C-alpha cells in the first residue's frame, strides 16, 4: 500500500468518525460535551494516523479500516453492551454481606 493510499484512507476514516459523532448528537444519543470530545479525539486520531501513514503505510491503512468498522458498529449499536460495558460493578456475596453488617457465615460482623 502506498503512502498516498494510506493517507486517503486515514482522511476518510477521520471524516467518518466526525460524521458519526455529529449524527449521534443530532439524534440525541450524545450530549454536546460528548460530541465535542468525540470530534476532538477524532481529529487527534486522524493526525496521529496520518503521521504514521508516512512511515508504515502497510500497517496504518488496514488499521484505519478497522477503526472505521469499529466506529460504525458503535454508532449503529451492533455490538450492544460489549463496547459500553456494564454500568454497575459486580459485588461479591461476601462484600455485600459485609456492607450489610453481617458476615458470610450468618452472625453479626465484628468491626
Image (tube, grey):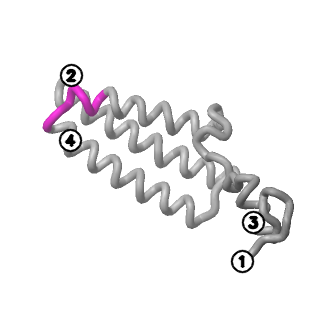
Closer to the eye: label 1 or 2: 1
Mark 4 touching mark 3, by CB under 8 A? no
Q: Which mark is residue 98?
A: 3
- Report the front residue among 14 and 55: 55
Q: Residue at x 20, y 30 (%)?
A: 57
User: Within 10 angstroms of label 1, few (less than 14), some, or many (20 or more) residues?
Assistant: few
Identify the residue under disc 2.
1
Q: Earlier in the sequence, mark 3 or mark 1?
A: 3
**What stretch of residues is rendered in magenta?**
55-61
Q: Residue at x 33, y 26 (%)?
A: 62
* Residue 78 horizontal side relative to residue 56, left or right: right
**Residue 77 lies in the magenta stretch:** no
Quarter in which the C terminus is drawn: bottom right
Q: Which mark is residue 52?
A: 4
In the rendered image, residue 17, in percent from the top left (x then y), is placed at 47, 44
User: Residues under labels 4 and 3: Cα distance?
Assistant: 51 Å
The kind of secondary structure element at disc 2 is loop
Which quadrant of the structure image shows residue 1?
Answer: top left
Q: Which mark is residue 111?
A: 1
**Depicted 28 relative to depicted 15: above or below:** below
Amino acid at each position: 500500500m502506498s503512502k498516498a493510499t494510506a493517507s486517503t484512507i486515514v482522511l476518510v476514516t477521520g471524516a467518518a468518525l466526525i460524521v458519526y459523532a455529529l449524527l449521534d448528537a443530532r439524534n440525541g444519543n450524545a450530549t454536546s460535551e460528548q460530541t465535542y470530545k468525540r470530534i476532538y479525539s477524532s481529529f487527534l486520531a486522524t493526525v496521529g494516523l496520518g503521521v504514521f501513514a508516512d512511515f508504515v503505510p502497510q500497517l496504518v491503512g488496514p488499521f484505519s479500516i478497522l477503526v472505521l468498522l469499529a466506529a460504525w458498529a458503535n454508532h449503529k449499536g451492533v455490538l450492544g453492551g460489549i463496547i459500553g460495558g456494564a454500568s454497575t460493578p459486580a459485588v461479591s456475596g461476601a462484600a455485600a454481606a459485609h456492607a450489610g453488617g453481617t458476615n458470610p457465615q450468618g452472625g453479626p460482623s465484628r468491626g
